[in-house]
Amino acid sequence: MTAPAPVNFRKIAALVAAAGTLFWLYTFYFIAHVPPGDGSGFQWLAVFPLGMIFGLFFLPAWLLVAINRLPRFTTLVGVAGLIAFAIIWAQLLNEFPKS
């Protein structure tokens, strides 16, 4: 019998951080294609809370992955960032004008 391979939390943290980064970039594309509504451009204000989530959760996660420190904590921070993205994005989808 062989022992199972240990879980590589650094790779998991990098995948979670990559998923969060790609979602953050996708939000710019989505917001650019929102129907104009009243034409004021206020839909672009959604960039600020999403950018704060990216800066608070995923930039530190990328830094910690890069220096290979605290991989379990980094994974937890990334998952918390994905949860924060889900909560804020669900609220924003209700606020965007429908086509």
Image (tube, grey):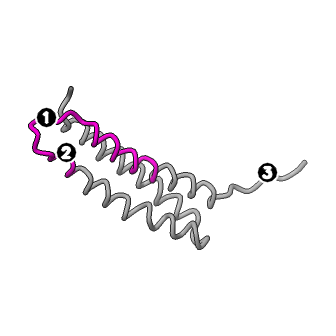
Magenta residues span 21-45
- The reply, left or right, for residue 9 in relation to residue 95 is right
Res 78 label: none
Q: Which residue is identified by label 2?
A: 43
Q: Residue at x 47, y 57 (%)?
A: 78
Q: Which residue type does callout 3 highlight?
A: Pro
- The reply, left or right, for residue 42 in relation to residue 54 is left
Contact, CB < 8 Å: mark 2 with mark 1?
yes
Q: Quadrant of residue 81?
A: bottom left
Q: Which residue is identified by label 3?
A: 4
Most common secondary structure along the magenta stretch: helix
38 within the magenta span: yes
Q: Which callout, 2 or 1, points at the residue further toward the start of the chain?
A: 1
Residue in front for this viewpoint, 39 or 5: 39
Q: Which residue is identified by label 1?
A: 37
Q: Which residue type does callout 2 highlight?
A: Gln
Secondary structure of the residue carrying tag 1 is loop
C-alpha gap between disc 3 and disc 1: 55 Å
Q: Which callout, 3 or 1, points at the residue further toward the start of the chain?
A: 3
Secondary structure of the residue carrying tag 3 is loop
Question: Where does the image place residue 3, in percent across and percent down from the top left?
Answer: 83, 53
Residue in front for this viewpoint, 94 or 98: 98
Q: Residue at x 17, y 36 (%)?
A: 36
Could you tell me which quadrant the C terminus lies in? top left
Contact, CB < 8 Å: mark 3 with mark 1?
no
Q: Residue furthest right?
A: 1
- Category of crowding for the residue at label 2, using alpha-carbon neighbours closer than 10 angstroms: few (below 14), some (14–19), many (at least 20): some
Q: Which residue type does callout 1 highlight?
A: Gly
Q: Residue at x 15, y 47 (%)?
A: 42
